[in-house]
Image: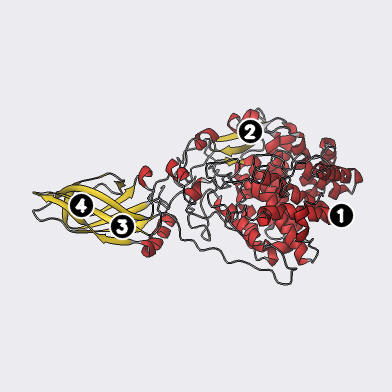
Amino acid sequence: MWRCVALLVTTLLLAEAKNMTVDMEVTQHWDDNFEGRFCFNLPHPIIGFELVLHFSSGVKSIQQWLGDWLHPPTDCATTLTLLNQDSHGAHPAGEFCVKMMGKVCGAAAPGGQGTLVDLTDDGMQPPKVPHVTGAAQTKYNYAEVIEKSIMFYEAQRSGKLPANNRIPWRGDSALKDKGAGGEDLTGGWYDAGDNVKFNFPMAFSTTMLCWSLLEFPQAYSKSGQLNYMYDSIRWPLEYFIKCHTKPNELYVQVGSGSKDHGSWTSPERMDPNRPAYKIDASNPGSDVAMDMAAAMACGSMAFKSKDSAFSGKLLSHAKQIYSFAKAHQGFYSTSVSDAAAYYRSQNYTDENNWGAAWLYKATNDNQYLADAKVRYAHEPAWGFSWDEKLGGNHLLMYKLTGDDTYKSDIESTMTTWSKPGGMAYTPKCLAFRLEWGPLRYSANTAFFALMAAKYGVHAASYRQWAMCQIHYALGDTGRSYVVGFGTNPPKKPHHRASSCPMLPAPCGWEAQQNTGPNPHTLYGALVGGPGKSDDYTDDRKDYVHNEVACDYNAGFQGAVAALLQLAIDHELPSASKCTSCPNP
């Protein structure tokens, strides 16, 4: 049912602290008719409420204009519960009155009390901030950023939530996600500020996070986040296994992008009957298939010593999916037309290399390495992302082979991200690749630079440049671009679930238009970022600059983990040099 038990229990517990009770003021009474109102002095704005009414004598034929009855009123009832309508949930601080009229079951004027339950927010307290002992002093608390970024991914979870769910405003959702044959497709992550599961960016995000865990496990363990991190990447990996329903059949999306983007509500409230889209031998999608194979191959390495059975299952599926993708090449956005408007792949050669390199890394089977070499492109990366794996391929191939040809491609990529190489920079030093989500590209490239440095390529300059790009997002301009972190962080991210009040209040476009902050803090989410002049407005309606996404946080979190590792090793560059906009 849409009224998730876990969320309702949370709401009831919070209500004990947030209830307001007043007596009814009877404004008119004649014969058996009455008019009255319940007036509350709101200490702060609200965007959702429940009103529990207790009358001294039975009433009937009640009319009011702000909500719907939680249960149909019966004649001569003494207790009624009203839930705000979607268009009447938002009210400013100050006096708020609910007026009504009806009939009383008797001659005397009715008395009554009304208890207002504020359903605006969850009352969630900020998480305890972790600290790493023995590390070099840092300008920003990297451990806190990692903690909160992992919590962002927990807020994106779809399906049946675990008993240890840390996000009180999220509940079970999309429990009817299934394939054409009834296959269970529950789980995974919602993509961004919407409620669709797009496997293409989800797989890229999973691989990037997994890669950071493989490379910087001490950063996660020292910050106290290691087990949370394992749980984080396991969530989409288990979903990917469900999506692989036959050797040559792979589900790659659940939910219609056009339908979902035409509504504004939380996953718990949305229509649970959603389409699922697959690829197969007749309708290929080697780009998304290779991405999913790469994620599962990486996951098999991450879980090898922690859960060998799960690791083996992941590798088995990765091999099958790789073989399927290799034999049936093509763009998945051609086979799944609904994806074309949102995540259209521009090239699948890079994914062929990406998948082969990860399978070689996981198996040491030379055939995968041979495949990766055939598919490799000797050209600089425009912007390491869900659609372009060139940068990741440079790193993997150099690490796997030691061939300086690949090292040269790493250097070429970093040159294109320098001012002499033609990269535009904002006045406050952000490498500005694209107007839409510029922080995503700079953060992913920062991860690329930090990985290259770890592999011995221009370690000092690459680390310095990467630190400055990450510090831009964390607050070097005077504001943070990470929700719930640092100075003046975003409070109105373009994100449906965090903008909705608590159940059972409804949620629709009024929540999107709400001028106040999102009622729930989406801890750790990196927003798209500023314009080319460092201009930024915290506007929920601005999906270009203020939306969040799983792929936005992936390289960002990995880069922060790399910086924390440098702090642990006392090899961190100087933060003071960032004011000069250093080149890589």
User: Which of label 3 and label 1 is nearer to you?
Assistant: 3
Q: Which of marks 2 and 3 precedes in the sequence?
A: 3
Q: Secondary structure at mark 4?
A: strand
Q: In the image, what residue type sits under mark 3?
A: Phe
Q: Which one is in front, 421 or 401? A: 421
The amino acid type of the residue labelled 2 equals Ile
Q: CA distance from mark 2 to mark 4?
A: 61 Å
Q: Which mark is residue 456?
A: 1
Asked whether the residues under the numbered discs 3 and 2 touch, taking CB atoms below 8 Å apart as contact, a structural biologist would say: no
Q: Tell me the element at label 1.
A: loop
Find disc 3 in the rendering and name its residue. Answer: 40
At label 1, which amino acid type do we have? Gly
Residue identifier under label 4:
36
Which type of secondary structure does the marked residue at label 2 adopt? strand
* Inter-mark Cα distance, 3 to 2: 56 Å
Helix, strand or loop at mark 3: strand
Horizontal side of 37 relative to 132 (left or right) equals: left
Work out whether residue 445 or residue 250 is closer to the camera in this orientation and state it: 445
Q: Looking at the picture, how far across and down is residue 245, in whole percent?
A: 61, 40
Quarter where residue 329 is shown: top right
User: Is residue 450 in view?
Assistant: no
The answer to whether 71 is drawn above or below residue 144 in the figure is above
Q: Which residue is mark 2?
A: 279
Inter-mark Cα distance, 1 to 2: 40 Å
Task: Give the spatial CA distance, label 4 vs label 3.
Answer: 14 Å
- Marks 1, 2: nearer the viewer: 1
Q: Residues within 10 Å of mark 2 (few under 14, many from 20)?
A: many
